[in-house]
Image (cartoon, rainbow, N blue to C red):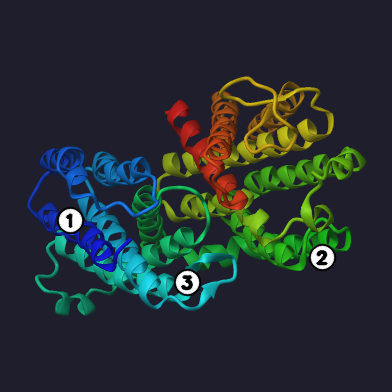
Amino acid sequence: MSSRRIRSRQAIHVSCVLFALLLRFLDWKLAMVMALGALAFNVVVLPQLSLHKEGEDESKHSFGTLLYPSVIALLTLIFRDRLELVALAWGVMAFGDGMASVVGRSTGEHRLPWNAAKSWEGVLAHLVFGGIAGSFLHAWTLGLVLTPGELWAHPFSLLLGFGAATFTALLESLDSGIDDNMLVPIGSALAAWCLERVLTAPDLFADLVTHGRVAFLICLGAGVAAVAASSLTLAGAVTAVVVGTLVAAGAGWSGFGLLMAFFVVGTGVTRLGKKIKIERGLYEARGGRRGMGNVLANGGLAALLALLALATSSMEESALFVLMLAAGLATATFDTCSSEIGQAWGRRTFSPLTGKSVPPGTEGAVSLEGTLAGLVGAIGIGVLGWAVTAYPPAGIAAVVFGGVVGSTFESVLGDVAARRQLELDNDLVNFLNTLVGALAAAWFYL
């Protein structure tokens, strides 16, 4: 693809953010009309400009241009009373992702150790340009600034913008197979929303220290034992101590009990059928020990939801966050049990989309034995959450529903990726399926 065509494509990508300036003057309905108008433009006009890369699947490029305005419309609907968050996400996507591509292609010489297709220069460009644009548009939409020079008087907008840009720079650096036009804006909006809740919570850090001291000592002891038993790597154990402490401090001992139940069940089923899995070449790397990525993928959302539960002053919201935490862990339990049991004892492994038999270990593949084991695991987490008074009896159905939906999402995503020969980052997919499970449970419960 010529450098001129690259510049033209990125110029359109970045210049579209000028429409975000209008969010200061529009209500959400007019903002939706604007986003849908941009979608129509991308469908009718943009294909005539032939800006896709040479050798690139044109349908893939077209899909990306459709996602751009579609995701803005979705965020406008979700955050219809908080259009400053939509503007922030729009800025991070347009300038962060756009400049990361330009800088990465032109000066990106230092490759990332976890993804050789990306560079440190691109990640830094995403963080800097996305952070500035997101911060400015956040403050602009709220009516706090008229020029970028006034931005430095509003540190809260800067914290949200650069916090969201940092999070999405890391997400975008992974080989996830998920289109940046979806991953970056949704990740930015959610990161800014969560960060805002935490930063505005009164006495949050004092409460963390108060509620988390005993949990820290328990987690520290459990982490040392897990390393000695070859269940966790050292980095995984350190991460688990942080996650466990946050969960106990924010969601109480009931939330901590659910997290420990998942860890015990997950460790146990991983070791079941070890000989069979080794013979099939399907046994976990590092001899079954879980690393930092595994811990964050399965427990990171639980830590975040526990933090949000502690940050809110509403008992109803706090209870909902704890229920979502349980659903995320139910999803992780379903996924772990189904894959580990299915790989060892699944008599027929098949594609969830076509039903055709595929080899064990194929991305997204499922088996009857594994699915039943996963369902039992999710039900166990759901019932345990009710038993430790994390939520009322009606919450059991919501938690199990979330576990099923989240795990199904992971299987379908993996199956689609296998068909398109995409390499998905397993830890990122596991985090996403816990998020989908938590959101599904919240929808079901409400």
Of residues 269 and 396, the one nearer the viewer is 269
In front of the other: label 2 or label 1?
Answer: 1
* SS under mark 3: strand
Query: What residue is drawn where x is 74% and y is 47%?
Result: 263
* SS under mark 2: helix
Give the image location of residue 235, x and y in percent. 71, 67
Name, please, the residue furthest toward the right. 275
Amino acid, disc 2: Val
Residue 119 is tagged as 3
Residue 224 is tagged as 2
Q: Is residue 113 above or below residue 316?
A: below
**Disc 3 from disc 1: Cα separation:** 25 Å
Q: 234 left or right of 278?
A: left
Q: Earlier in the sequence, mark 2 or mark 3?
A: 3
**The image quarter in which residue 42 lies:** top left
* SS under mark 1: helix
Of residues 380 and 51, the one nearer the viewer is 51
Q: Is residue 140 above or below residue 299?
A: below
Q: Earlier in the sequence, mark 3 or mark 1?
A: 1
Q: 438 left or right of 168?
A: right
In front of the other: label 2 or label 3?
Answer: 3
Give the image location of residue 272, x and y in percent. 87, 39
Residue 16 is tagged as 1
- Tell me if residue 127 can be seen: no
**The image quarter in which residue 213 lies:** bottom right
Q: 181 left or right of 342?
A: left
Amino acid, disc 3: Ser
In front of the other: label 3 or label 1?
Answer: 3
- Tell me if residue 330 can be seen: yes
Give the image location of residue 152, x and y in percent. 23, 79
Is the C-beta separation of discs 2 and 1 under 8 Å? Answer: no
Is the C-beta separation of discs 2 and 3 under 8 Å? Answer: no
